[in-house]
Image (tube, rainbow, N blue to C red):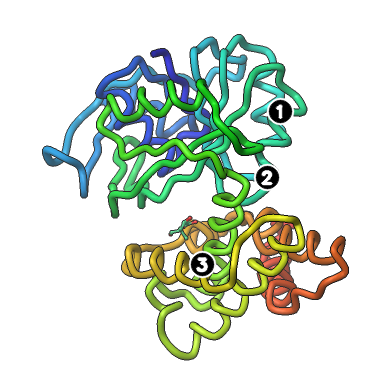
Amino acid sequence: MEIVVFGAGSLGSLIGGLLAREHDVTLVAREAHVCAVRESGLRLEGAIDGGPSRIFPAATTDGTGPEADLVVVTVKSFDTRSAAETLATGSVDAILSLQNGMGNEATLAARLEVPVLAGTATYGAILQEPGVVECTGRGEVVLGARAGGPSPLADRIGEAFVAAGLEATVAKDMPRRLWEKLAVNAGINPVTALTGTENGAVLEEPATDLARTATRETARVARACDVSLSNREALAAMVDVAEATAANTSSMRQDVLAERYTEIDAINGYVVDRAGEAGLEAPTNRLLTSLIRTWERGRGLR
Ligand code: PAF
């Protein structure tokens, strides 16, 4: 299969590198990273079957739309619209969004005339330096139709992922899975970013109250949006991820450390907006959103 990974940061590079063991993969990423990959390949380190490996996916920074059987979109949520505009100038058969936050699939589908699948990825990844990505935890890719239900296309893409040795599952309940991931991110990401801690901190007092409340609020808003996600299920998912990634630096904390704009709008900000539409309050998500936005404004990022 010809696969383009659009937005090859840490997670995209890891997924692209793993897929390149079986498929023809092109990474679209920032200049320095792409130059390093072009010169000496992509080095995968950490929790990789068979130990560290050097992989040579083709690489490009060309801004024109790619041609591919599949584009895996891994850009930050605030870059989804511009990614869709670039992809619209190319020729691709299918898109899979593996992004944090909500609303990405709708943004892509509104601008592209090809099927857009939804997905989540729990692999832990850190870009150590241009050309070197470390897998900090083996996870799983879950993908499926964005509105839920069966999808032969998702089945084929799931098989292609498994053929490359990735853990991949095709799910018929993607809306629920996306809300569950949102509830996990709403608890872990802003709390670790604001307190400068690893993910495991949300399991301990005093951070755990804040993270749990944000996760519970998100589940309540999900139910108001007709998604069946109980508080207990959302909390269990948040705790599972925090335990499995206890030593990891969340993506939002990585953004804050690098003084970059964060995905707060598509995570806690999204929860606050949907709560408002449903006539609910989400005070903890609102507080976390305000604090991160204030930090962004202070850095001249917003
Ligand atoms: O955004 C992230 O960092 C990840 O989605 C998660 C699940 C919080 C693990 O670090």
Residue 40's disc number: none
Which quadrant of the figure has residue 32?
A: top left
Residue named by callout 1: 109
Tell which circle, 1 or 3, labels the residue nearer the N-terminal end.
Answer: 1
Where is residue 283 shown, x and y percent of the image? 75, 78
**295 w.r.t. 51: above or below:** below
Q: Is mark 2 within 8 Å of ligand 1?
A: no
Question: What amino acid type is highlighted by mark number 2?
Answer: Phe
Where is residue 205 shown, x and y percent of the image? 45, 90
Name the residue: 58% across, 72% down.
231
Which quadrant of the figure has residue 20?
A: top left
- CA distance for labels 1 and 3: 29 Å
Q: Nearer the viewer, residue 101 or 181?
A: 181
Query: Is any atom of residue 125 visible in this view?
Result: no
In the image: residue 58, left or right of residue 221: left
Quarter of the image with the C terminus is bottom right
Mark 1 burial class by Cα count in 10 Å: few <14, some 14-19, many 20+: some
Tell which circle, 2 or 3, labels the residue nearer the N-terminal end.
Answer: 2
Q: What kind of element bears circle 3?
A: helix
In the image: residue 28, left or right of residue 57: right
Confirm or deny contact between disc 1 and disc 2 (CB under 8 A): no
Residue named by callout 3: 233
Residue 78's disc number: 2
Where is residue 242 shown, x and y percent of the image? 40, 68
Name the residue: 44% across, 45% down.
121
